[in-house]
Image (cartoon, rainbow, N blue to C red):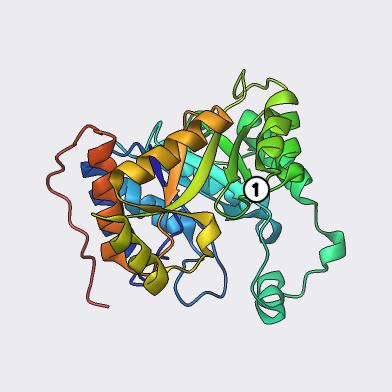
Amino acid sequence: MSILDLSVLDLGDPLSTPLLATRAEELGFSSYWLGQHYGSPTQSASPTILAAIVAGLTTTLQVGSAGVLLGFQAPYQVASDFQLLERLFPGRVRLGVCRGKPTSPEIMDALLDGRDTTRTASFRQKVETICRWFRDSRVGDAPTCPGPDAATSPPLWVFGTGYESATIAATLGVSYGFSYYQNPSPEALKIVRTYVDNFVPSGGISSPEFLIAVSGICASSTGDADELLSRHSVLPPRATFVGDPDTVRRHLEVVSERFECRHLVLFNPTLNVEVGLTTLRYISDVFELPRRPVEGHTVAFADM
């Protein structure tokens, strides 16, 4: 198991992500993914900064973005940032990218800063560019990351909810993250199969690698979990698995079997950090994840 953490969605407090990440490591989860959302009062627009913080506070977690909204980012900057993170935290960094869209025309204008959208590269072109720079570690005569040697690049993931993202990931030979909690439709399995069936081996990976992101709330009883869902959830009920530990475990096992997926990522759909922590503890217990005592970390950076 690993966790899909949409940045600070769980509470909106900037300390929630470090707290959840360090606790996730203690509870035996293997990786931690951070989302990017512009214009949200409760979510972060800076997964790269949060990834550096989380990686610095933990010792075993793989840390990734899920994903950088590439439609509004320069591929060179994204590639350089994540190569630097990989240099600082070898083997623990994952770059996940997605198309994404801003929440309002005002946010879009602020992000574009006068640039003409008709002249910017397509999402696929930007992913292709990052693939090339990760392979070559250079743009012309300039390195994409400072250092005496060619930078080691982190694994590249494309996140999405439809056929286009699945096809891009497959034909470029990179890993794929399917956001099932956003698209729990009957088409979901076909989308994932599109990735698997059309995968072309690349220099990065030789066979399809994908994850399924699901939404879940776990409590001591199904009744308590249902109450938490009604009070705190920011997603429609059909997109969330709710119940006691055994019920949620069965739900997750069904998803794993249906998609033939070894990598499930759990997203906490509430704005309450205690609900998120409780869910993580129950999931860790019911799946008997190996506990990892963590010493010497603090999650308090400053009084906010």
Residue 91: x %, y % from top left: 41, 31
Residue 150 makes an appearance in the image: no
Tell me which residue sits at (51%, 45%) in the image.
213
The quarter of the rendered structure image containing the C terminus is: bottom left
Residue at 66 percent across and 49 percent down: it is: 185
What x and y, as percent, mark residue 294?
Answer: 16, 43
Above-or-below relation of 29 to 66: above
Q: x and y percent of residue 22 in the render?
A: 25, 50
Q: Residue furthest right?
A: 118
Residue ID for mark 1: 160
30 to the left or right of 83:
left
Query: For this view, does 165 lie left or right of residue 77?
Result: right
Report x, y in % for residue 202. 67, 22
Residue in the foreground of this view, choosing between 249 and 215: 249
| Within-10-Å neighbours for mark 1: few <14, some 14–19, many 20+ | many
The mark total stands at: 1
93 displayed left or right of 187: left
**Which amino acid does the dot numbered 1 rest on?**
Gly
Taking 304 as reference, is 62 above or below it?
Answer: above
Residue nearest the viewer, comparing 134 with 167: 167
